[in-house]
Image: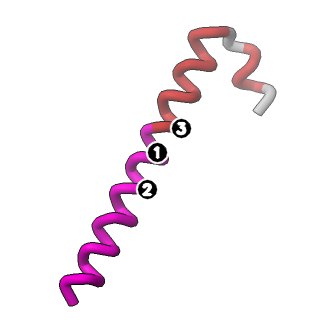
Amino acid sequence: MLFAFQNNFFFLFLLILLLLLLFFFFFFLQKISIPSVFLI
């Protein structure tokens, strides 16, 4: 049971990390040039 809880926590941590990476990626694109965001 503890192992399953650790797996869920690790999955949640990866999901939050991925969302943060996407957020910084879009922020970085907006800093470079705004029209590049509309290409996605």
Q: Which residue is mark 1?
A: 19
Give coordinates of residue 6: x percent, y percent: 26, 73
Q: Which residues are magenta?
A: 1-20
Q: Main secondary structure of the magenta part?
A: helix
Position of the C terminus by quadrant? top right
35 and 14: which one is in front?
14
Task: State yes or no: residue 15 in magenta.
Answer: yes
Query: Which residue corresponds to the image point at 49% horizontal and 37% vertical from the top-left?
Result: 21
Q: Which residue is mark 2?
A: 15
Which picture quadrant has residue 34? top right
Q: Which mark is residue 7?
A: none
Pointer 2 local density, CA inside 10 Å: few below 14, some 14–19, many at least 20: few
Residue at the extreme front of the image, as rendered? 3
Residue at the extreme bottom of the image, as rendered? 1
Q: Amino acid at mark 2?
A: Leu
Query: Which residue corresponds to the image point at 58% horizontal and 27% vertical from the top-left?
Result: 26
Pointer 3 local density, CA inside 10 Å: few below 14, some 14–19, many at least 20: few
* SS label for mark 3: helix
